[in-house]
Image: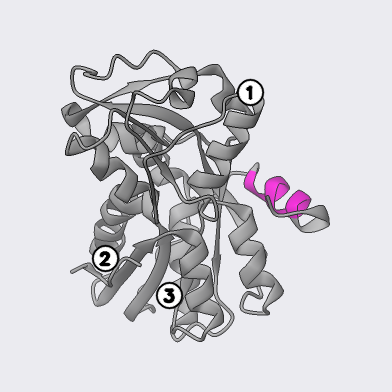
Amino acid sequence: MIRSLSTVALTGAVASTLVGCGAEESSDPAPTDKISGTVTVFAAASLTETFTELGKQFEAAHPGVKIVYSFGASSALAEQIEQGAPVDVFASAAPKNMQQVLDAGDITATPVTFVRNRLEIAVPKGNPGHIAGLADFGKTEPKIALCAEQVPCGAAAKTVFEVAGVHPRPDTREADVKAVLTKVTLGEVDAALVYRTDVRAAGDKVEGIDFPEADKAINDYPIAPLAKSPNSVAARAYVDFVRSNRVREVFTRAGFDHP
């Protein structure tokens, strides 16, 4: 069964390679009975629901394999990998953090973009703060939550505010997008910027508001097996599974875009 550990723009030629690879659909991997053991996956917090579902599917297809997830801010996960955490697969919410791991020599295979995500305004059910759009984040009245700028959702938020000419006045900045979403679901803030997938995952606890500037900060999500993977064969099989046509519907239903 799946277990979870505690939660804690590639540039230049590498970016071109990653995006180019992501544009190609991965064919369904051939079934194999040769993989076994534990696959430890470090993944962006915004992948929690989809990867949990995919982990169950992968385990069902490969009896004897266990998927262990650690979900959190991509920046924090990248730092843990650099510090020697025994990890098989890394899935980041931004190329920048994958590049960090690549530069450290912790990845030998080319990272591939497997999905994309965009920001959406999240408000509590009923929109008690009467939030209409991004401009409200520059006002003093609403209580606002944003991701810390060093994590992917915070970097994307910074971009859209710059494009819109809005100077946000956040009451709180959180370590990852799920922590921001929690502020909304608990009614502790009037609005937040999270990913569209997080709004969908929250169901009727929140309402989502689209805004045009979101198109200017779409996040590419790269994935790669790690060079020092304790279970390299199973790690590669997991990456192939995530990229395969058979699981596209899971990502589509969650609100992700495909490369």
- Report the disc number at residue 183: none
Give the CA separation, mark 3 to mark 2: 11 Å
Residue 54 lies in the magenta-colored region: no
**Amino acid type, callout 1:** Gly
User: Which residue does the image show at 64% across and 57% down from the upper left?
Assistant: 96
Residue at 48 percent across and 77 percent down: it is: 80
- Does the magenta portion include 16? yes
Q: Assign the magenta stretch its main secondary structure.
A: helix
Query: Does the image show residue 259?
Result: no
Three-letter amino acid code at disc 2? Glu
* Of labels 1 and 3, the one closer to you: 1
In three-dimensional space, the C-alpha distance between marks 2 and 1, rounded to whole angstroms, equals 47 Å
Whole-percent x and y of residue 256? Answer: 44, 36
In this rendering, would 152 be left or right of 86?
Answer: right
As displayed, is residue 72 above or below residue 41? above
Q: Quadrant of residue 64?
A: bottom left
The residue identified by callout 3 is 234
Q: Are marks 2 and 1 in contact (CB under 8 Å)?
A: no
- The mark that comes first in sequence, 1 or 3, is 1
**Residue that sits furthest to the right in the current view:** 13
The residue labelled by disc 1 is 165
Q: Which residues are magenta?
A: 15-22
Image location of residue 150, percent across then percent down: 55, 55
* Disc with the residue nearer the chain's start (3 vs 2): 2
Callout 3: SS: helix
Secondary structure under tag 1 reads loop
10 Å crowding of disc 2: few (<14), some (14-19), many (20+): some
Mark 3: amino acid: Ala
Q: Which mark is residue 59?
A: 2
Task: Decide which of tag 2 and tag 1 comes sooner along the chain.
Answer: 2
* Real-space Cα separation, disc 1 to disc 3, in angstroms: 47 Å
In what quadrant of the picture does the C terminus appear? top right
